[in-house]
Image (cartoon, helix red, strand yellow):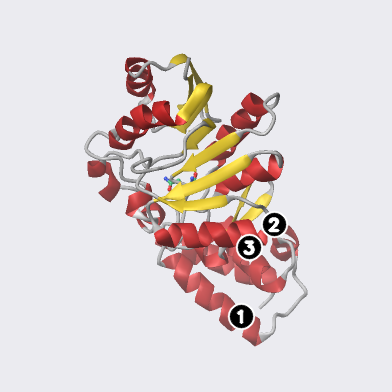
Amino acid sequence: MTCRDLIRRTAEQFSAAGVPDPVNDAALLLSHLTGLSPLSLRLDEDTVLDYRVVDAYQVLVGQRISRIPLQYILGEAPFYGRLFRVDSRVLIPRPETELLCEWALEVLRNDPLPRILDLCCGSGCIGITLKAEKPDAFVTCSDLSPDALALAAENAEQLGVDVAFCQTDLLDGFATSGFNLIISNPPYIPSADCNTLQEEVLREPRLALDGGPDGLSVYRRIIPDAFRSLVSGGVLMMELGEGEDADVEKLLLDHSFTSVEIREDLSGIRRMILARKP
Ligand code: GLN
């Protein structure tokens, strides 16, 4: 069977299993094993694959049919131009979080030697990206999950980026303060919705998703504590769940933050918020 036929047949199996992007995933899994580009594999009508490659491919195909996320099978996900290792210990980095990083870098542009805290760091994608893009920053990444922190530390090492790690429950008992920027993509999905997510998302750690009864529990804890841990003029930036912007804005204003700004993601959802400590 040629590459093209194999991909076509696999894409049909994926469609039948409800995999959202069947042709793309079929080609990417084969690309992962062969090192050839997904597009050239889709067009290839000549190469007859070694049976060992086909066998290895069938194992990955079986995993994808059982709706394990593509990125967990590949063991990596791209984020802001770098590849991060990912597995079931951490949330898979999303494109909307890249926009949050882009915005943070804009905010920090004229800020020399900023002290940054990435709360709920997961894979470390935010904190590691900020340090890589702004090497004069001092970055600390913190998470409640020791498993997530272990993977984030692997990512920092693999990408050659020097950040500090700290296992904490948000800012509880956090000794350091004086941050110029606290940034977070916290869990923000209402608990009741956590059971009805897309099958792939159900494979991601519940701890990284579940934002309590109304989705806002973690914002309620972060906001007052972040206010204490920021320098005056310091900035808090957070990703938001859909429809949560007005509630989070009110929480920020109730806790003496000012200069609130909100930005949309690429689907036009009000996805991230910034506020300043006066
Ligand atoms: N900061 C990580 C990310 O943006 C993890 C977020 C989380 O675990 N809630 O992907």
| Residue at mark 1 | 54
Q: Earlier in the sequence, mark 2 or mark 1?
A: 1
Disc on res. 27: 3
Residue 59 drawn above or below residue 228: below
Q: Quadrant of residue 68?
A: bottom left
The type of residue carrying mark 2 is: Gly
Task: Please identify, in this view, whether the residue under mark 2 or under mark 1 is nearer the observer.
Answer: 2
Residue 127 as seen in the image, left or right of residue 113: left
116 vs 228, nearest the viewer: 228
Q: Is mark 2 within 8 Å of ligand 1?
A: no
Label 2 crowd (10 A; few <14 / some 14-19 / many >=20): few
Which residue is depicted at the point 21% across and 37% down? 213
Determine the CA span between mark 2 and mark 1. Answer: 35 Å
Give how far apart the Cα atoms at labels 3 and 1 are. 13 Å
Could you tell me which secondary element the residue under label 1 belongs to?
helix
Badge 2 marks a residue whose secondary structure is loop
Instruction: Measure the C-alpha gap from mark 3 to mark 2.
Output: 30 Å
